[in-house]
Amino acid sequence: MPLLHRLAVAVVTAAASVTAMSATAWAAPVPLPLPHDEGSTDHLIVTVSRSGGAADSVTYTLACHPAGGTHPAAQRACDQLDSATVWGRDPFAPVPPGAMCTGQYGGPATAQLRGHWAGRPVDARFSRVNGCEIARWDRFSVVLRLPGS
């Protein structure tokens, strides 16, 4: 059998195989979602301090999907987290080393988020020591609710 003829037969056979596999994949039933497991909810412990010290710190729990916990604006905080979550990116990532940040100071407030979000562990710290950190804090302004605000 000439080489060109063998190549043509191989191409036609491969195309037929792909078509058959595609038809099978489209005909396969879609799996049902797993039942809701209360232990698998997105859950964070939010600790915020106006002065950066323990004396005026407050700790909230925040559960999402469904919203709950002791956070005073749980649904709004969950909505803010959802809007900051993009596939393939860490919404809680720290400011990269060497980032060019403005030299403004937003005060001594600090915060920490611990727990799980979107199936991943979270241990993030926040401050307001420069423009980059202030912008990062502001992206989570509802979640990082200052005591008394």
Image: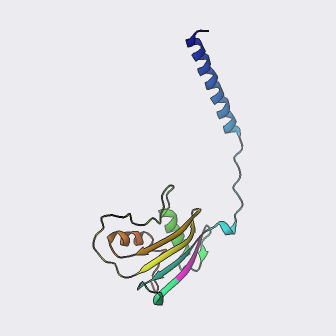
Residue 60 counted in the magenta span: yes
* Residue 78, image x, y percentages: 54, 69
Q: Quadrant of residue 65?
A: bottom right
* Residue 116, image x, y percentages: 58, 68
Relative placement, left or right, of 145 versus 118 is: left
Q: Which residues are magenta?
A: 59-64
The image shows residue 35, relative to residue 21, as above or below, that is below
* Nearer the observer, 97 or 146: 97
* Nearer the observer, 145 or 11: 11
Q: Residue furthest bottom?
A: 55
Q: Residue at x 47, y 79 (%)?
A: 145
Residue 26 counted in the magenta span: no
Q: Residue at x 47, y 63 (%)?
A: 91
The image shows residue 78, relative to residue 87, as above or below, that is below
Q: Quadrant of residue 26?
A: top right
Relative placement, left or right, of 9 versus 86 is: right
Q: Quadrant of residue 102?
A: bottom left
Q: Residue at x 34, y 78 (%)?
A: 106
Q: Main secondary structure of the magenta part?
A: strand
Q: Residue furthest left?
A: 103
Give the position of the N terminus as an image quadrant.
Answer: top right
Q: Residue at x 47, y 81 (%)?
A: 48
The image shows residue 96, relative to residue 15, as above or below, that is below
* Residue 123, image x, y percentages: 52, 70
Q: Residue furthest front?
A: 97
* Nearer the observer, 144 or 126: 126
